Image (tube, helix red, strand yellow):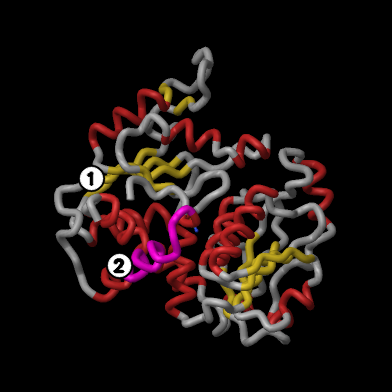
Amino acid sequence: MKDFLDLAALEPERVRELVARARQFEHTPHPDALAGKVIALLFMNPSLRTLASMQSGIARLGGSSFVITPGQGTWAFETRPGVVMDGDRAEHVREALPVLARYADAIGIRAFADGVDLDADVAETTFNAIAGPCPKPVINLESAMNHPCQALADFKTLDDLEVPADGRFVLTWAWHPRALPLAVPSATVQMAALRGMDVTVLRPDGFDLPDAVMARARSIAEKTGGRVDVTDDRRAALDGAHVVYAKSWGSTKNYGDTATDMQLRDKLRDWCVAESWFANTRDARFMHCLPVRRNVVVADEVLDGPRSVVLRQAENRMWGQMAVLDRLLNEDETR
Ligand code: CP
């Protein structure tokens, strides 16, 4: 494995190997696995879990890390090609990444969607501009349309909880006061398809995931024996569900148009996951990647109740990323 950019690009067997390795790290200390290795962590956007779990995981394996947050103690980065850099961005990623690569053995990069042009974000224009000049292994710590570290942690969480591999997985849109990125829902629908699950995306009109994301999820499901559907019928979607995974995201119908998105979502405040949603499920687990807005996305009664597995998901971020780093930096490529 040269980079870790996209969980769904891996064969299911490779994902299961990563989960197995993550479990080894969870149960047995390996304090020398990354001895002498340095990992650069470049955060163009804020984080709690990703930053802390990467640093903790690297330290547990005997490695070290440094964090770069452009514009906050580091020069602001320009990512666009061919621009006249006469504004406030003093350093271009075309130099910055090769420089960081000289100090580090691998680089983790977080760069969210620009949220203006859906096609550009689906094409991962900004992330690719940053990662492209990097000659060292790259870990995607969340890009415009992907969050493979979250997806790996969620895959492990489902396995930990012995959720049937062909079980019913509902990814539900939830209300939020503003348009959020598509990275987690896109990675989640593909992760569940990769696991062979019967996936339903429950969303109101105007909030479809991008066609390319759904087409890929369906293509993955065809190979794994899974299935991917879309509906706005909450009762039908939740009937018999093993998992309800909540996430808010912006309207793709009005991508980049904040005012219209706000008008559309203003009528959707009842999309807050409550205990009543689970009445006809198979005592479903509740999942969310965090951070989550209480009583906006999900009611306290669910988040604080026994069906919530959000803390396990967050912990699995660390074990999963440790497995990824081990594979990137220690794997024998002749295997
Ligand atoms: N789930 C997740 O990526 O959390 P952070 O944004 O806090 O890193």
Q: CA distance from mark 2 to mark 1?
A: 20 Å
Q: Residues within 10 Å of mark 1 (few under 14, many from 20)?
A: some
Picture coordinates of residue 100, whole percent (x, y): 30, 33
Horizontal and vertical percent position of residue 91: 41, 22
Q: Which label sits on residue 267?
A: none
Camera-nearest residue between 56 and 72: 56
The quadrant where residue 240 appears: bottom right
Residue at 18% x, 57% y: name it. 62
The earlier-in-sequence mark between 2 and 1 is 2
Q: Which mark is residue 21?
A: 2
* Label 2 crowd bin: few (<14), some (14–19), many (20+), radius 10 Å: some
Foreground: 84 or 162? 162
Q: Left or right: 248 with respect to 223?
A: right
Q: Which residues are magenta?
A: 9-22
Taken as a whole, is the magenta stretch helix, strand or loop? Answer: helix
- Mark 1 highlights which residue? 38
Q: Residue at x 53, y 16 (%)?
A: 83
Instruction: Tell whether position 165 is magenta.
Output: no
Q: With 66 as the anchor, is 280 left or right in this view? A: right
User: Where 120 falls versus 153 (above or below)?
Assistant: above
Picture layout, residue 306 above or below residue 318: below
Secondary structure under the numbered disc 1 in the rendered image: strand
Question: Closest to the observer: 241 or 264?
Answer: 241
- For mark 2, give the secondary structure: helix
Residue 51 image offset from top left, x and y in percent = 39, 52
Q: Would residue 61 appear left or right of 1 to someone viewing this image?
A: left
**In this rendering, does residue 80 appear at all?**
yes
The amino acid on which the numbered mark 1 sits, given as a three-letter code, is Val
* 55 versus 152 height, above or below: above
Q: Residue 7 in the image: x percent, y percent?
A: 46, 56
